[in-house]
Image (tube, helix red, strand yellow):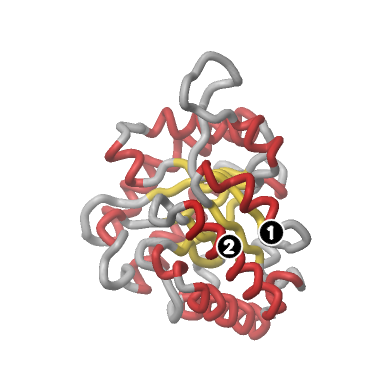
């Protein structure tokens, strides 16, 4: 299976920013992308996941740029009587191209298990949306333990997606965000060798299922690690570090230079 053509950066805003704060941040990001040629030239792909309330306005504000907007969650169900949920077809209709599923916070705080996450992946793929699947071990430990935990979370999604679209198109390549739960919000990310070891195992697992993937690292990700991790990972999934848009710009700098050197 061929490597992705371009590096990828994602930003998950979670629930940190209010409506006005989110729009101010998105405006700053659009300004950054306008100054930095990496995204607009197609050298690096960039997606942003705001909260549901801000979603439509964020989509409007990135019009005319190559910044792609997605959602932080999706219902596993088809449109129908599901109060408070948002369906994949609706997300696609308003312009979403990515949707985050399986984050540790939803697994832990909302009781979402691997089978529910797999159903959400299928709902997204059916609607033409790329799932951003978060996987990661709960406790710090050796690479082998991390691989085992991630394998268990990834396998149901690979099986479900493979059944849904055989083969799945490269345009809908599954994005895997490796986020060790113990590293989320921590002072520092996981070690480089640890990330490389887990990333290699995840790529092998996806290749065995014949599902194309793009692999990101998250979990206190920020500037300074993209170069060290390339090409084991295809980019970063940023959280709080991205609240300062200058950090996004630094990551774009790193990935642009690294990909150019590797070419």
Helix, strand or loop for disc 2: helix
Q: Earlier in the sequence, mark 2 or mark 1?
A: 2
Q: Quadrant of residue 16?
A: bottom left
- Image position of 127 (left or right of 137): right
Residue 118's spot in the image, x, y percent?
A: 48, 32
> Is any atom of residue 199 visible in this view?
yes
Residue plotted at (42% across, 67% down): 196
Separation of residues labelled 2 and 1 (CA atoms): 8 Å
In the rendered image, the quadrant that contains the N terminus is bottom right
Q: In this rendering, is residue 60 above or below 152?
A: below
In the rendered image, the quadrant that contains the C terminus is bottom right
Helix, strand or loop for disc 1: loop
58 or 43: which is nearer to us? 58
- Image position of 6 (left or right of 186): right
Residue plotted at (53% across, 80% down): 250
Mark 1 crowd level (few <14, some 14–19, many ≥20, 10 Å Cα): some
248 or 221: which is nearer to us? 248
Tag 2 and tag 1, C-beta contact below 8 Å: yes
- Disc number placed over residue 26 in the picture, else none: 2
Q: How many marks?
A: 2
- Disc number placed over residue 62 in the picture, else none: 1
Residue 90's spot in the image, x, y percent?
A: 64, 31
Mark 2 crowd level (few <14, some 14–19, many ≥20, 10 Å Cα): many
252 or 194: which is nearer to us? 252
> Is any atom of residue 167 visible in this view?
no
Residue 41's spot in the image, x, y percent?
A: 76, 73
Residue 69's spot in the image, x, y percent?
A: 62, 52
Return the residue found at the far front: 20
Q: In this rendering, is residue 145 above or below 102?
A: below
204 or 101: which is nearer to us? 101
Residue plotted at (35% across, 33% down): 112
- Disc number placed over residue 174 in the picture, else none: none
């Amino acid at each position: 299976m061929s490597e992705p053509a371009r590096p990828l950066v994602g930003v998950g805003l979670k629930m940190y920013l209010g409506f006005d704060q989110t729009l101010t941040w998105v405006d700053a990001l659009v300004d950054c992308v306008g100054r930095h040629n990496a995204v607009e030239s197609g050298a690096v792909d960039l997606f942003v996941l705001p909260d549901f309330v801000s979603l439509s306005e964020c989509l409007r504000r990135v019009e005319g740029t190559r910044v792609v907007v997605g959602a932080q969650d999706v219902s596993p169900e088809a449109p129908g009587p599901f109060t408070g949920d948002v369906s994949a077809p609706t997300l696609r209709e308003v312009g979403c191209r990515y949707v985050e599923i399986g984050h540790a916070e939803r697994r832990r705080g909302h009781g979402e298990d691997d089978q529910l996450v797999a159903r959400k992946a299928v709902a997204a793929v059916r609607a033409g949306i790329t799932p951003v699947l978060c996987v990661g071990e709960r406790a710090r430990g050796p690479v082998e333990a991390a691989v085992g935990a991630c394998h268990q979370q990834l396998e149901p999604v690979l099986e479900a997606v493979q059944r849904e679209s055989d083969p799945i198109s490269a345009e809908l390549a599954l994005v895997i965000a490796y986020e060790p739960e113990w590293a989320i919000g921590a002072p520092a990310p996981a070690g480089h060798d640890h990330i490389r070891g887990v990333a290699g195992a995840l790529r092998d697992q996806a290749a065995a299922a014949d599902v194309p993937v793009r692999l990101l690292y998250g979990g206190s990700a920020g500037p300074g690690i993209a170069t060290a991790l390339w090409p084991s990972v295809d980019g970063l999934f940023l959280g709080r570090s991205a609240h300062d848009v200058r950090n996004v710009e630094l990551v774009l700098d790193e990935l642009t230079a690294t990909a150019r050197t590797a070419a």
